[in-house]
Image (cartoon, rainbow, N blue to C red):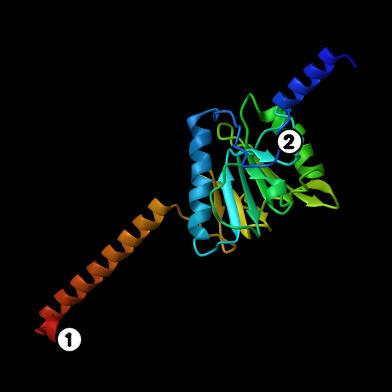
């Protein structure tokens, strides 16, 4: 090989190959629409509130997963829209670098379909999540058409997850249902309760407090009707 060609190869390698010594930043394109952004935020908020007492997981959206020390930036594959890794430390990261994370891959991945990504999400990414990541569960959801599909890895091959009567699909990894509620993908508990957002939880607590206050006011009024001073009860 000539010196010129050897130099070109080194230069090309330096540009395309990611080397692993230090931290690697995520390299994700912008989200397609506001719907996609809000859906990711919704999933993150709900799961983190539901698991607020847990420190053994990492949940994130639109973050690059680097799974090969000689991974090329030019590959078609990019990071999932939403994924959860179990059995790891709950802390912020610049990206998910598999060889820095004890070889851990996501336990569950959710892709949000769009016109520009649907083909890759249903094809190339599904193949990578099945054959390379061996991710136990893979779901995709279209925020526009509301198409919702889920797969569970059985003997190395993704098999469709059958929805229940409500159209929800059980995630064994999260021990939660995933289903559509008010045109959004949401989590539900095993007994069918909607996993609340922080705002919804605050509203529920406010409503409960108002109901309790009203009960006290009503009881006090009844006691006065009977000639009893509520303060003495």
> Going by the picture, which residue comes out furthest to the front?
3
Asked which quadrant contains residue 210, the reply is bottom left
Expressed as whole percent of the image width and height from the top left, the position of residue 219 reads 20, 76
Expressed as whole percent of the image width and height from the top left, the position of residue 211 reads 28, 65
Question: Image check: 58 left or right of 137?
Answer: left
Numbered circle sitting on residue 125: 2
Question: Image check: 3 left or right of 19?
Answer: right
Residue position for label 1: 233
Residue at image position (51%, 28%) is 33
Q: Residues within 10 Å of mark 1 (few under 14, many from 20)?
A: few
Mark 2 falls on what kind of element? helix
Expressed as whole percent of the image width and height from the top left, the position of residue 34 reads 48, 31
Expressed as whole percent of the image width and height from the top left, the position of residue 221 reads 14, 74
Numbered circle sitting on residue 201: none
Question: Image check: 41 left or right of 133?
Answer: left
Residue at image position (44%, 52%) is 197
Mark yes or no: residue 148 visible: no
**Mark earlier in primary sequence (1, 2):** 2
Q: Is residue 86 above or below residue 27?
A: below
Give the mark toward the camera: 1 or 2: 2
């Amino acid at each position: 090989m000539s010196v010129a060609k050897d130099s070109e190869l080194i230069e090309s390698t330096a540009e395309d190959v990611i080397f692993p010594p230090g931290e690697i930043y995520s390299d994700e394109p912008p989200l397609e629409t506001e719907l996609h952004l809000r859906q990711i935020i919704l999933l993150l908020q709900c799961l983190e509130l539901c698991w607020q007492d847990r420190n053994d997981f990492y949940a994130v959206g639109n973050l690059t997963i680097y799974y090969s020390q000689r991974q090329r930036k030019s590959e078609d594959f990019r990071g999932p829209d939403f994924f959860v890794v179990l059995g790891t430390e709950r802390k912020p990261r610049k990206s998910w670098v598999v060889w820095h994370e004890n070889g851990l891959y996501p336990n569950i991945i959710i892709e949000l379909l769009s016109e520009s990504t649907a083909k890759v999400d249903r094809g190339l990414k599904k193949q990578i999540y099945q054959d390379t990541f061996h991710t136990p569960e893979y779901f995709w959801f279209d925020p526009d058409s509301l198409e919702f599909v889920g797969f569970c890895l059985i003997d190395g091959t993704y098999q469709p997850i059958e929805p229940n009567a409500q159209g929800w699909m059980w995630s064994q990894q999260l021990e939660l249902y995933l289903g559509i509620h008010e045109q959004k993908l949401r989590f539900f508990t095993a007994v069918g309760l909607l996993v609340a957002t922080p705002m919804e939880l605050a509203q529920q607590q406010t409503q409960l407090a108002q109901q309790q206050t009203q009960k006290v006011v009503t009881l006090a009024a009844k006691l006065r009707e009977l000639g009893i001073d509520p303060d003495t009860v």
